Amino acid sequence: MGQSRHILVLHGPNLNLLGMREPEIYGTVTLGEIDAELSERAKSQDATVETFQSNHEGALIDRIHAARGKADGILINPAGLTHTSVALADALSAVALPAVEVHLSNLHRRESFRRRSYCAAACRGTISGLGARSYYLGLEALLEILSEKK
Amino acid sequence: MGQSRHILVLHGPNLNLLGMREPEIYGTVTLGEIDAELSERAKSQDATVETFQSNHEGALIDRIHAARGKADGILINPAGLTHTSVALADALSAVALPAVEVHLSNLHRRESFRRRSYCAAACRGTISGLGARSYYLGLEALLEILSEKK
Amino acid sequence: MGQSRHILVLHGPNLNLLGMREPEIYGTVTLGEIDAELSERAKSQDATVETFQSNHEGALIDRIHAARGKADGILINPAGLTHTSVALADALSAVALPAVEVHLSNLHRRESFRRRSYCAAACRGTISGLGARSYYLGLEALLEILSEKK
Amino acid sequence: MGQSRHILVLHGPNLNLLGMREPEIYGTVTLGEIDAELSERAKSQDATVETFQSNHEGALIDRIHAARGKADGILINPAGLTHTSVALADALSAVALPAVEVHLSNLHRRESFRRRSYCAAACRGTISGLGARSYYLGLEALLEILSEKK
Amino acid sequence: MGQSRHILVLHGPNLNLLGMREPEIYGTVTLGEIDAELSERAKSQDATVETFQSNHEGALIDRIHAARGKADGILINPAGLTHTSVALADALSAVALPAVEVHLSNLHRRESFRRRSYCAAACRGTISGLGARSYYLGLEALLEILSEKK
Amino acid sequence: MGQSRHILVLHGPNLNLLGMREPEIYGTVTLGEIDAELSERAKSQDATVETFQSNHEGALIDRIHAARGKADGILINPAGLTHTSVALADALSAVALPAVEVHLSNLHRRESFRRRSYCAAACRGTISGLGARSYYLGLEALLEILSEKK
Amino acid sequence: MGQSRHILVLHGPNLNLLGMREPEIYGTVTLGEIDAELSERAKSQDATVETFQSNHEGALIDRIHAARGKADGILINPAGLTHTSVALADALSAVALPAVEVHLSNLHRRESFRRRSYCAAACRGTISGLGARSYYLGLEALLEILSEKK
Amino acid sequence: MGQSRHILVLHGPNLNLLGMREPEIYGTVTLGEIDAELSERAKSQDATVETFQSNHEGALIDRIHAARGKADGILINPAGLTHTSVALADALSAVALPAVEVHLSNLHRRESFRRRSYCAAACRGTISGLGARSYYLGLEALLEILSEKK
Amino acid sequence: MGQSRHILVLHGPNLNLLGMREPEIYGTVTLGEIDAELSERAKSQDATVETFQSNHEGALIDRIHAARGKADGILINPAGLTHTSVALADALSAVALPAVEVHLSNLHRRESFRRRSYCAAACRGTISGLGARSYYLGLEALLEILSEKK
Amino acid sequence: MGQSRHILVLHGPNLNLLGMREPEIYGTVTLGEIDAELSERAKSQDATVETFQSNHEGALIDRIHAARGKADGILINPAGLTHTSVALADALSAVALPAVEVHLSNLHRRESFRRRSYCAAACRGTISGLGARSYYLGLEALLEILSEKK
Amino acid sequence: MGQSRHILVLHGPNLNLLGMREPEIYGTVTLGEIDAELSERAKSQDATVETFQSNHEGALIDRIHAARGKADGILINPAGLTHTSVALADALSAVALPAVEVHLSNLHRRESFRRRSYCAAACRGTISGLGARSYYLGLEALLEILSEKK
Amino acid sequence: MGQSRHILVLHGPNLNLLGMREPEIYGTVTLGEIDAELSERAKSQDATVETFQSNHEGALIDRIHAARGKADGILINPAGLTHTSVALADALSAVALPAVEVHLSNLHRRESFRRRSYCAAACRGTISGLGARSYYLGLEALLEILSEKK
């Protein structure tokens, strides 16, 4: 077996309240549980994840920059920044790592401003509306993309 | 182990040409290969798939209707109809089966009219931009959703 | 009493599921019941109806064409095609028979895209939001329009 | 037979000139003739109508308010106010009586600003483009809606 | 010399405050002075004017209706109703008398919503931005139009 | 203590039904109760209020004009006219009295057309979404503004 | 009597064909006739006009520049350039002479792109829809404006 | 002389009624006559045409797919589907044959929604407004394009 | 007397410069003075306030999160973030505390982009245009809302 | 054989650089070659062409005017003026000669502002995207239109 | 030192009035002074400038064409044509010389239509809002770009 | 020589990656090299620069605030925040120091959302599309502006 892969998992603003916040939209699973599950799933495929949540656009961008040369791919739920942050999308383009955007809720069933995504064009693909599962499928996609590249 | 699940897989217009058409956008895998892979993956989870491709909006709607009482969920790539067919979206709402929308390409990197999806609001979630993998992850999501409901 | 009149009644996509689909929007009466009632009402006024439902835009257009020289007027619920089909509206204009557009639900209380109607300009009038009654009033209007022309 | 029903019929601005004004758009029947016909039709179904025309938005709203506890339903042709009066639409919502909106002409064949209706969402349904007949069918619909409720 | 002509002069909402209100936009001449000047100018051309100001859309419409068979033309400054009243414009179209729309201020130098005029299409022409002079020129235009028709 | 202040309180269309109309949006307090409370609060600060409700745009404008030289400030809930009446906003600008706009409900949680306010730019400030309290706080603000000016 | 005034009259593209072109829109009077009438009217008020027609935006701008220090006011029918030329409007602003914009036809009854005027904001006022009379009234307005300034 | 060329001619919805439908827009020539003329013109240039009309979007797409390896170019009048079908345009892109879009009427003189064409970007060029001649010129263009490629 | 209430007061970007910045828009009172006044007013009603200003969107969000279980309500002036931050609005929704949005200036008299508020829909109500008074009235509203809930 | 026909061929701005300018968009044929070919083709059908290129909107309009009574039809490539010149389109309408608009490139594959054509509505038809061939087909169409009229 | 460079400096409509026109927007320096300064600055860097002002779009385009093979770069202030001339922008693209667009005033502080620039995409860069300095910096940029290319 | 000037140079998000990120858009020079060059150029004109890069909107705002009383002018490349940050633009307005906005790339050749700049109206001028040179010219402009003020 070859070289292990490392994935940076980024959670945008307010996701730290997951499970405690509007469960009818976001479900009852907590961010800690999602991170644990992602870690376990990565391990089973000889990969590692490092996870980071922040309510600060700048901190998320700093972390994306820091991933250059360290991580092999990025799994990101930009949350509210999806619709408003050109800088975050530019950061993803700048580091040029394979990235997958995930959303817990189905953005097409919410306010119309949630349909615009600056990040989407900077990512390989998007998975939305499947709850915590959006993360797990996103990790799976990312690991497969990396396998092919090797 | 319990009751087996049956998934209807629908491919919209022009997907029959997959692998033969604009490979820089849609990749080189054929629809037959995707269907075979979906079948295999379903089998390994004690599920079955039935696949159907049509260039006819009406035929796709007829098939969705026919799934009532027969299929447990729908995996659909509406292709060009994504952006123009209210009737297809209404059909998904009408049968009220769990559905997941998939797209091979990243719609945010193409013409702006491809960003509008009538179907998305009628589905649980959407997976896009991951090539054939969008289908496989969509099947996985659908089977898990059905597992939870049991 | 004079010449009997013949009305073509067209039901667009998904209306075959009427009574079985989202009853909070569309009510519980079935399409068969509506057709029977229309037939009875026509008969009581020395008229006949022929009804046709299809999920295929093309089949509806074919049927409109076939009505030339056979039917005296058209009663149509274009359903989801109302908002997306220029071809269907063109067909109504092309045959130049008096037509009345009907809708079961009040389109102004639903998604904003349901407020655009290509068909409306090709019809004499529109009746919407009155459930199955929209059809019955539409038939009545059509028969009166035809009476005046004689 | 049971309890008689009473319908308030409201005619918006300029309808007093009906039959005298732009007959190619609005026809030659006068408002008096429409009122008489509505009265007769109501009587034949054990109902009564009271009719009111005004060119004053405020007077129409006052009359809608006055209908609370007196009328069982409202038949309204808001004319030019259809497209510009939020206050009139709010009045209809406020009294919470079943209401049907009618228009003599087909608004989809006229200026584009006539396609917007504030009133439509405050009414059960809309009937348009059928000349004086729009009123008669609207009355019929309203009486049937009231019959069902009893 | 022939038949005398009679002109209805209508002043929309807030024009009663003319000369007392925002003089930097509307000037210092009062409505009474404008009416007196219009009267004098009409007299010198063997014509008469009757003037009416109201803050009530409905009262203005009533007055337009009352002009049928009495006045030969209408000079109207719809003020704030210019931009919001379809009913007033419909009244002008309904009576089918030659009408000229006037504005004291240059609407293109003010808020963008003041650039939309429902009334303009119902009038022969529009004169704006010339202060009280807009009225005087409008009267002149109207009298000439009527002269030609005779 | 100095000169007493007098406030004109204006209630737009349909507010006479307050407490009787859609309580989930507008609450259960009646307009009479609001007026009484405003009167009491004014008295406690050596001020007086006069209140006026009308469903007529023109009557509200007339009343604003009549306030010139009589009232020291205007507290106004334009209701449905907020979004459609340029003439009402012009009246507020014309009399040049300090004015505060109030709304019972949070307009940002309702139909999108309720987000446009012609009146807002003609007022000092706006208070919305706080139920009857919007009025009381508006009065307070107005009295303080007037105190400062003395 | 005092100092004579000089007016530059500018006719935009295609106005040289007046009387020969689409008479149902523009009437049958020729540009020569309009110029002669303007000249006569000016003379009777102790003023002079100089007229210039061009199909070249640049030539019209040159002429406006040349009017600095020579003409006292500008009467302009920008024709098709009304809706498309920022440069022409800038020229009017640059020379800072009183200007009046005129149009033969009622722009509100034509294509929607004819409703936008770049020139209007650079002029004192606009007169439109009154045929050749638009010019004569415009001249009158301009001469009165100049009289007041002296 | 070399290898003969084969052209697929596609007629979209309602074109089967040509000559029988709204002759003031579409002319009096029938589709059969157009097909015969196209055939003759092709023959004279050592080419063949096969023609197909359908009111079904799906049937047109199927036929485009079937042309792969059989036809050398496509001449298409998408009719009402021009403005609404992404799937049809995708089919043209997918088969990657030279295509020319033709329209009988001048779309710029009709409803504004007819100005949007999804197909145009998938074709080499467009010919519109020249009646049946649009087809003949389109065939000529296509044959020349194919000649150059050889 | 019952349980004391605690209010979190949040000041968005640039408000630290209050009194030192564009006094013609924002007035001359400093943020320290506002905080002192709020504190005093709260104390007089048996409540406490804690105030926090930041130019960092993330810091404001962090503070909102920290208020869970500690504060009873939030008074927020989001300043420039009002119009651009979905994440901040999401934070307010997530903690589900009663919140009131305040603005010093009248946003309807400034640039059009200042009319959009993401935060408004996440708050009970909004108070704007009343200078420092907007804060004081907002505090009053919040304390009353909390009183009612007890 | 009858009367010879004369065609004015107009080339808009920058077309003089044809063959020397962006060949990937406009091809390598020069304007001189196109003119020569048009001349030859006309001659073979007993017609004559006169060609004119200008970078001046006004010069093109002058030339269109000069064609009255001299030319029988106009073939025009308005180039960049297509999208911005109302005056040029008005000139085509004014002279009322049959006109055909041509474009070398497919405007639907370029910047979105190139999709608007003021000229199109003033012409019989449009031919675009076929390179120099667009001109030749346009000439052919024009000559046939003229043949029919005789 | 190498080969001298030659720069074409183009001034669009109304710039000939510089220093005499609206000094609060455009400053008091004249065009002659700017040209002299540009000439001097060029000379000090072993370059030459030739300057040309015109109010004619066509003359500016002609001059751009004439620069082919003569000038090494273009410095252009398109003035009012910036926002309306596709033809001018096409000319810049056609000659394919390095170009820099300059504006005296800050277009973001003026009318909204001044924010659209057709020319910008045809130039390397844009310098705006810095008065005459915009030109001097633009020249500097252009000379440096040319130095690098050698 | 007089008083030295001090310039704050601000680099927005992702600019720290300059030279390492998408060189086809942003070039190969690093931010360190730009800062060094700016420093040198400032020194040669008896001025100093202090440079600051941050991916945090708030940190940039803090730094702008801190410049009050310390710096004489601001040179800012807001990067992705240009298009999304009202707060940053407000900060520039608040401190009221002369500011120049610079961009490395030509925003008119990129995604359409990059054409909107909130910052531009808060700055004296903008320089874009000239690579690192945009900074150097911006510094030059700023120093000259400051020289004039002294």
Image (spheres, coloured by chain):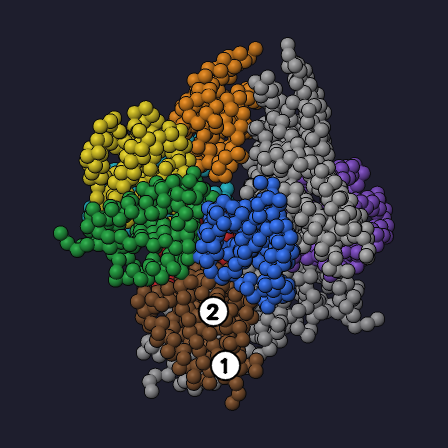
Chain colours: A green, B yellow, C orange, E purple, H cyan, I blue, J red, L brown
Residue behind mark 2: L63
Q: Quadrant of residue H117?
A: top left
Q: Residues within 10 Å of mark 2 (few under 14, many from 20)?
A: some
Near-viewer residue (B32 or C29): C29
Chain letter belonging to callout 2: L
Q: Are marks 2 and 1 on the same chain?
A: yes
Amino acid found under the numbered disc labelled 2: Arg
Left of A93 or right of it: where is E100?
Answer: right
Q: Quadrant of residue L37?
A: bottom left
Near-viewer residue (C58 or C27): C27
Amino acid found under the numbered disc labelled 1: Arg
Residue behind mark 1: L5
Q: What residue is drawn where x is 57% and y is 45%?
A: I3
Residue E93 seen in this snapshot: no
Q: What residue is drawn where x is 49% and y is 62%?
A: I55
Mark earlier in primary sequence (2, 1)? 1
Residue L75, above or below C17: below
Q: What residue is drawn where x is 53% and y is 53%?
A: I8
Residue E65, above or below A83: above
Q: Quadrant of the N terminus of chain B?
A: top left
Q: Residues within 10 Å of mark 1 (few under 14, many from 20)?
A: some
